[in-house]
Image (spheres, rainbow, N blue to C red):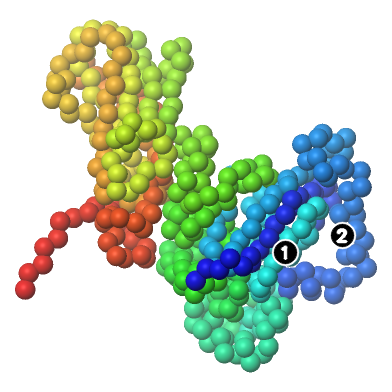
């Protein structure tokens, strides 16, 4: 149930830091509150020093400053988020994602610009679990509720759900500092998600915890989004981003680079990441190979001929290998291997074109393309290794290149993929769409 009401308005926001005067990054509003109470005078002086940028032209972030200890974490970023939107924020390490979430969580103020938030915010940030380490799990739950402006009876009504979700019943009266990292994360997410925030901000929750916990987090966030709450979600997991979010904002070097549909922005992000490039080539003097044959290029392409890093799970994807034969009389066997995000070998594919199988190839350039059918691979990131063997007159490897190209398989939850009407997670290395029959 979306409305045109604005939940979050970010206008011309910049954030600067000074190297050598590191700002203490509390992991929650509660942490900021407690730190200020412990040493108010010391903290006032520290923050005053940190936020004094009178010597910097903050209106021109691209202008070189004489003061070399200045770091621009964000540069003139603006965007609005409507009530009920689920928005992803992506980008390379150092792009400004976590800094933006700290500003939105009011952990630290912007150096320039304004942020307006309408509604109660609950956040789980990458920098920590959101708890005070000396307090027990029970005390931390109530403290976080108080910081969010909730009354005790409101927290009471959610307490059992929070504890059950986190699975820490036996340790509620134990100080959080004695919790394992997994226990802290489980309880922190449970508190953030169950205290009914109007706006939920989550940073890289899927990078921690076991697979079962990650699935619970995804399911809970989907449930929150379906109830019309606003969610901002930062992750390096493009599969989770495209599943969770309708809209994605791409940050690059502190600037808003792109803002649009999840599929569009994720595709642009992957194309811009050289580690997941869909097209790689070598000049002749640097090409891998031997005096018999050498590798010229490897490309990921669709049946429409487009080079892309983002592949619809329903569509076929071709791995195109271009190589040059330098000597006559050799029988070649091009091949490639797919490796998933966990480093598992998904498959090895060998060229079996009947027109060339077992036949020598004359000198010249050749392009061999292996087609992977749609509705076969699972979601996720796949890298490509490629090898060229000669079978006759001698059996030898001419080249073997690892991670030459990579691509992301994306399930947009639309159309006739193998998931059918199921919207939850589907584990597995492959996801074939099988023919089903039912009889009675």
Between 189 and 113, the one lying in front of the other is 113
- The residue that appears at 32% across and 43% down in the rendered structure is 345
Query: From where the camera sits, is residue 350 visible?
Result: yes
Q: Is residue 335 above or below residue 153?
A: above
Quarter of the C terminus within the rendering: bottom left
Percent coordinates x, y for residue 234 in the rendering: 57, 57
Percent coordinates x, y for residue 79 in the rendering: 65, 54
State the residue position of label 1: 116
Percent coordinates x, y for residue 413 in the rendering: 36, 58
Question: Would you say 96 lies left or right of 229 here?
Answer: right
Q: Earlier in the sequence, mark 1 or mark 2?
A: 2
State the residue position of label 2: 47
Pointer 2 local density, CA inside 10 Å: few below 14, some 14–19, many at least 20 = some
Quadrant in the rendering for residue 69: top right
Question: Helix, strand, or loop for circle 1?
Answer: strand
Between 128 and 265, the one lying in front of the other is 265
**Outermost residue toward the left?**
440
Percent coordinates x, y for residue 134 in the rendering: 72, 76
**Between tags 1 and 2, which lies in front?**
1
Quadrant in the rendering for residue 296: top left
**Outermost residue toward the bottom?**
153
- The residue that appears at 87% across and 43% down in the rendered structure is 56
Query: From where the camera sits, is residue 402 visible?
Result: no
Q: Is residue 250 above or below residue 394?
A: below
Question: Would you say 10 lies left or right of 23 here?
Answer: left
């Amino acid at each position: 149930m979306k409305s045109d009401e604005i939940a979050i308005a970010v206008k011309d926001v910049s954030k600067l830091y000074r190297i050598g005067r590191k700002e203490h990054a509390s992991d929650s509003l509660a942490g900021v509150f407690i730190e200020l109470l412990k040493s108010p005078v010391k903290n006032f002086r520290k923050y005053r020093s940190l936020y004094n940028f009178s010597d910097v032209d903050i209106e021109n972030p691209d202008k070189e400053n004489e003061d070399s200890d200045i770091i621009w974490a964000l540069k003139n970023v603006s965007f609005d988020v409507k009530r009920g939107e689920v928005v992803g924020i992506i980008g390379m390490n150092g792009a400004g994602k976590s800094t933006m979430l700290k500003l939105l969580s009011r952990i630290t103020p912007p150096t320039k610009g304004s942020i307006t938030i309408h509604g109660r915010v609950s956040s789980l940030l990458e920098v920590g679990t959101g708890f005070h380490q000396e307090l027990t799990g029970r005390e931390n739950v109530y403290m976080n509720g108080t910081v969010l402006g909730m009354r005790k009876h409101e927290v009471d009504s959610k307490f059992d759900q929070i504890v059950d979700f986190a699975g820490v019943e036996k340790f509620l009266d134990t100080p959080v500092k004695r919790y394992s990292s997994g226990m802290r994360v489980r309880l922190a997410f449970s508190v953030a998600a169950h205290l009914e925030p109007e706006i939920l901000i989550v940073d890289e929750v899927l990078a921690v915890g076991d697979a079962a916990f990650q699935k619970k987090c995804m399911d809970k966030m989907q449930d929150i989004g379906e109830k019309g709450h606003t969610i901002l979600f930062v992750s390096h997991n493009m599969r989770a981003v495209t599943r969770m979010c309708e809209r994605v904002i791409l940050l690059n070097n502190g600037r808003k680079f792109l803002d649009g549909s999840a599929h569009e922005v994720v595709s642009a992000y992957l194309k811009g990441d050289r580690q997941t490039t869909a097209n790689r080539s070598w000049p002749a003097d640097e090409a891998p190979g031997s005096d018999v044959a050498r590798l010229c290029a490897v490309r990921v392409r669709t049946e429409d001929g487009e080079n892309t890093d983002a592949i619809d799970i329903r569509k076929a994807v071709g791995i195109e290998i271009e190589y040059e034969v330098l000597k006559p009389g050799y029988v070649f066997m091009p091949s490639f291997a797919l490796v998933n995000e966990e480093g598992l070998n998904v498959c090895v594919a060998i060229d079996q074109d009947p027109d060339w199988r077992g036949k020598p190839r004359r000198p010249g350039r050749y392009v061999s393309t292996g087609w992977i059918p749609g509705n076969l691979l699972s979601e996720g990131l796949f890298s490509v290794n490629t090898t060229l063997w000669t079978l006759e007159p001698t059996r030898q490897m001419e080249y073997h290149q690892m991670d030459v190209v990579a691509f992301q398989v994306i399930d947009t939850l639309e159309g006739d993929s193998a998931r059918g009407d199921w919207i939850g997670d589907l584990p597995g290395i492959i996801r074939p769409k099988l023919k089903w029959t039912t009889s009675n």
